[in-house]
């Protein structure tokens, strides 16, 4: 399917989601959010897509967040009769049932909703020119797409509060020190590095990976004892899958496993 504000392609088991509004630093208005929601729906439903990489077109910005100019002009809305799709900002910040891994390849600015999309991903690779921030209070708003809740859960509280209450951003190296970023690389190595991480994930059984993500995310909500005694859909799927047999067999035969995802 052709999209106007985003690009979606798949190579093997890796899906690539690219925000394609570089002329406005990949900020999102309602139609762009609508397209991205549809893309994430497609990724979630595709049994052959095992991991996704989210990035922005160009070298300046991953996403500058909400398109404030469109909002100020009164054009930040869907056409009449078009109903919003699920998923929240960028189609991902409120997507609670997506247990396939998602890697953010952050090229340049990740501000406001752009930072919130990165926070919603599982792994973040940043270019050396990347910056992260939730500047919403500086324009009379707040980071309502999960930022005010995710950031204090992902980095030390005082650092998160300092960022959120001042609206000031941090550079890629600081974000790495705080634990917000997994790896910082030169701009020309960004996608190569994100693909390296995706390849590492693909070395693992896909249902095991989804079960691991589901158990980890669901378990954060409850006490440890309850988390360890609870059952999880994707782990149950994995335990009854062909891959549950293939893994130990491949190990004993000293060969690479052939994962089927079934």
Image (cartoon, rainbow, N blue to C red):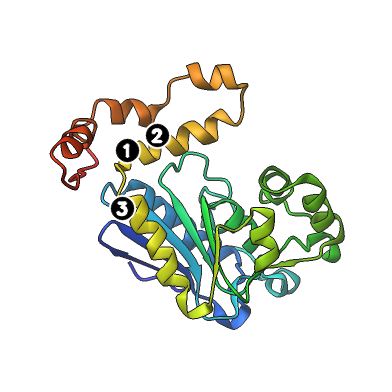
Question: Quick one: which residue is furthest to the left in this view?
Answer: 253
Residue position for label 1 = 207
Instruction: Tell me where residue 66 appears, x and y as whole percent.
Output: 67, 65
Which one is nearer the viewer's eye here, 21 or 247? 247
Task: Provide the secondary structure element on which disc 3 rests.
Answer: loop
21 on left or right of 235: right
Q: Residue at x 59, y 63 (%)?
A: 30
**Mark 3 surroundings within 10 Å by alpha-carbon count, few (fewer than 14), some (14 through 19), many (20 or more):** some
**Whether residue 147 can be seen here:** yes
63 on left or right of 168: left
Which one is nearer the viewer's eye here, 112 or 192? 192
| Residues marked 1 and 2 touching at CB (< 8 Å) | yes
**Mark 2 surroundings within 10 Å by alpha-carbon count, few (fewer than 14), some (14 through 19), many (20 or more):** many
Residue position for label 3 = 49
Q: Earlier in the sequence, mark 3 or mark 2?
A: 3
Disc number placed over residue 211 in the picture, else none: 2
Vertical order, 79 against 150 (above or below): below
Instruction: Tell me where residue 239 appears, x and y as whole percent.
Output: 29, 26
Q: Residue at x 39, y 27 (%)?
A: 233
Q: Measure how far apart labels 1 and 2 are at the Cα level.
A: 6 Å
In this view, the mark in front (3 or 1): 1
Q: Measure how far apart labels 3 and 1 are at the Cα level.
A: 12 Å
Q: Earlier in the sequence, mark 3 or mark 1?
A: 3
């Amino acid at each position: 399917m052709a999209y106007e504000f985003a690009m979606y392609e798949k190579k093997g088991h890796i899906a690539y989601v690219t925000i394609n509004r570089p002329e406005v630093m990949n900020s999102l208005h309602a139609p762009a959010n609508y397209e991205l929601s549809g893309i994430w729906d497609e990724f979630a439903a595709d049994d052959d897509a095992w991991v996704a990489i989210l990035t922005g077109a160009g070298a300046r910005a991953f996403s500058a967040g909400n398109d404030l100019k469109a909002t100020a002009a009164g054009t930040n809305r869907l056409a009449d009769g078009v109903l919003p799709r699920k998923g929240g900002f960028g189609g991902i910040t409120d997507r609670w049932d997506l247990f396939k891994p998602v890697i953010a390849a952050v090229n340049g600015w990740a501000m406001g909703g752009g930072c919130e999309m990165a926070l919603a991903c599982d792994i973040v690779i940043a270019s050396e020119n990347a910056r992260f921030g939730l500047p919403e209070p500086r324009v009379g708003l707040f980071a309502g797409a999960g930022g005010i809740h995710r950031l204090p859960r992902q980095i030390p509280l005082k650092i998160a509060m300092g960022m959120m209450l001042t609206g000031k951003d941090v550079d890629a190296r600081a974000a790495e020190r705080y634990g917000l970023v997994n790896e910082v690389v030169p701009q020309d190595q960004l996608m190569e590095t994100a693909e390296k991480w995706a390849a590492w994930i693909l070395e693992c059984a896909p249902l095991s990976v989804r079960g691991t993500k589901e158990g980890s995310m669901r378990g954060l909500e409850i006490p440890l004892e309850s988390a360890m005694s609870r059952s999880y859909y994707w782990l149950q799927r994995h335990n009854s899958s062909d891959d549950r047999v293939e893994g130990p067999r491949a190990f004993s035969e000293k060969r690479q496993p052939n994962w089927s995802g079934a």
